[in-house]
Amino acid sequence: MAESVSAITRQVTKESQETCNSSVDIRLEDVEDCLIYDRLGVSIPFKKLYEDRKSVIIFVRNFLCYSCKEYVDDLSKIPREALKDANIRLVVIGQSAHQHIEPFCSLTRYPHEIYVDPERNIYQKLGMTREEIFTDSAHPSPHVKSGMLTGQMKSIWRAMTSPLFDFQGDLHQQGGALIAGPGSQVHFAHFDTNRLDHMPINWLLQLAGVQQTLDFSDKPKIIHV
């Protein structure tokens, strides 16, 4: 029997859309049967997300994190029609218990697919970072509008006022983004190095084949008459 070949994709940094020198070895075979859970606690294997079509899969740190909340705020602005026209599936995966999904979606108005990996099996097997690394050359995320101090205060307030008080995941776990499918093809991978290291959404959409470009700026629009 022929030996299966693991999919290897190159990671694209936010500094450049050119591929960098190092490659990220992504073996979907290692995680395809890991269970993820929907908002009702119903489980499905991870491979169901990408086996029949191309999917953009976003892994977030935890639902209390202000930067993840603001990133998903912007993901919620992606029209369903744009995804449908490109035959693209958009999925967010968190690492909390499934009971936190509904409040998080209500907060962010996120209308697309969302699941959780409460044991962080997929995060760990794919090798996502469990620490934060900041560099002087890092570009600020276009999707995080709050400063770090203000954002942390918002996160603390949400934790204190949550009826399901807990940390909603490992506070040290970073997320990432994959474009995978159909089947075990991996087209792109980015593993976040810190809470602000999200892949710009328009880049992800363009890499996945979505033609529409969205404006995620929080600056007021000037209407010329």
Image: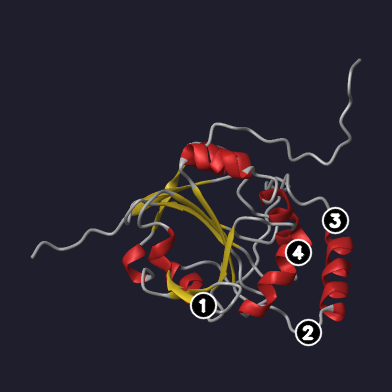
Give the residue at the far left of this rendering.
1
Labels 4, 3: front one: 4
Task: Check disc 2 and report its element: helix, strand or loop.
Answer: loop
Determine the CA span between mark 3 and mark 1. Answer: 36 Å
Determine the CA span between mark 2 and mark 3. Answer: 24 Å
Image mark for residue 42:
1
CB under 8 Å between callouts 4 and 1?
A: no
Determine the CA span between mark 4 and mark 2. Answer: 17 Å
Q: Earlier in the sequence, mark 2 or mark 3?
A: 3
Determine the CA span between mark 2 and mark 1. Answer: 22 Å
Q: Earlier in the sequence, mark 4 or mark 1?
A: 1
**Residue sitting at x 64%, y 53%:** 198
Q: Nearer the viewer, residue 156 or 104?
A: 104
- What residue does disc 3 label? 147
In screen coordinates, is 217 left or right of 195?
Answer: right
- What residue does disc 4 label? 106
